[in-house]
Structures are given as C-alpha cells and as structure tokens.
C-alpha cells in the first residue's frame, strides 16, 4: 500500500509540475501570431500587391533615370 501511495504522490507531483510549466506558452503565442498574420495577408492581398508593385515601379523608374537606360 505504501508503494502505491508513493507512486500516486510522484504522479501528482509531475502533474503539478507540468501544469505550472509555462515553456510551451511561447510556442502557442508564436503560432497564433503567425495565423493572424497569414489571415491579414489573405484579407489584404490585393492592397499589399498594389503597394509592392508601386514600390518596384518607382525603383525601376529611379534606376532608369540614374543609369539612363
């Protein structure tokens, strides 16, 4: 009976330790942030594409003005 009580006590200690451990919280938070960012990219895909195209067009125009080509 003593052996059973010791095993149960050890199991409870491990369960408490696992419950108090917060190392995995960082991973969950990062995954949630990535999911939100992907959702924003999907929602604003056309606007983001327009901005990127405008930036690259400006870069190309400025390059051509500098190089004469």
Image (tube, helix red, strand yellow):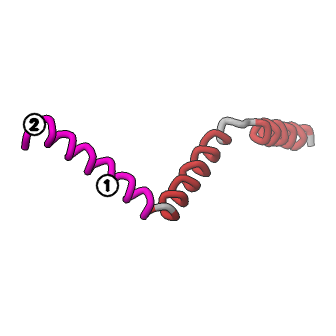
- The residue closer to the viewer here, 22 or 19, is 22
**Percent position (x, y) of residue 44?**
49, 61
Indicate yes or no whether the magenta region holds residue 25.
no
Residue sitting at x 56%, y 55%:
35
Task: Say above or below: 30 vs 49.
Answer: above
Residue sitting at x 25%, y 43%:
59
Separation (CA) of disc 1 from disc 2: 21 Å
**Percent position (x, y) of residue 12?**
84, 41
Q: Is residue 47 left or right of residue 55?
A: right
Residue sitting at x 33%, y 52%:
54
Which comes sooner in the sequence, label 1 or label 2?
A: 1
Give the structural element (helix, strand or loop) at label 1. Answer: helix
The magenta region covers: 46-69
Tag nearer the camera, 1 or 2: 2
Residue 15 is labelled as none
**Percent position (x, y) of residue 51?**
39, 53
Residue 67 is labelled as 2
**Percent position (x, y) of residue 50?**
38, 58
Of the 4 image quadrants, the one containing the N terminus is top right
Give the structural element (helix, strand or loop) at label 2. Answer: helix
**Residue found farthest to the left:** 69
Q: In terms of secondary structure, what is the magenta stretch mainly?
A: helix
**Residue found farthest to the right:** 1
Indicate yes or no whether the magenta region holds residue 47.
yes
Q: Residues within 10 Å of mark 2 (few under 14, many from 20)?
A: few
Q: Mark 1 touching mark 2, by CB under 8 A?
A: no
Of the 4 image quadrants, the one containing the C terminus is top left
Residue sitting at x 66%, y 36%:
23
- The residue closer to the viewer here, 58 or 39, is 58
Q: Which residue is mark 1?
A: 53
- The residue closer to the viewer here, 61 or 34, is 61
């Amino acid at each position: 009976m003593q052996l059973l009580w010791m095993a149960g006590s050890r199991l409870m200690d491990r369960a408490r330790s696992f419950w108090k451990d917060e190392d995995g919280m960082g991973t969950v938070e990062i995954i949630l942030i990535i999911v939100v960012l992907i959702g924003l990219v999907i929602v604003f895909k056309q606007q983001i594409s327009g901005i990127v195209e405008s930036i690259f067009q400006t870069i190309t125009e400025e390059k051509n003005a500098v190089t004469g080509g």
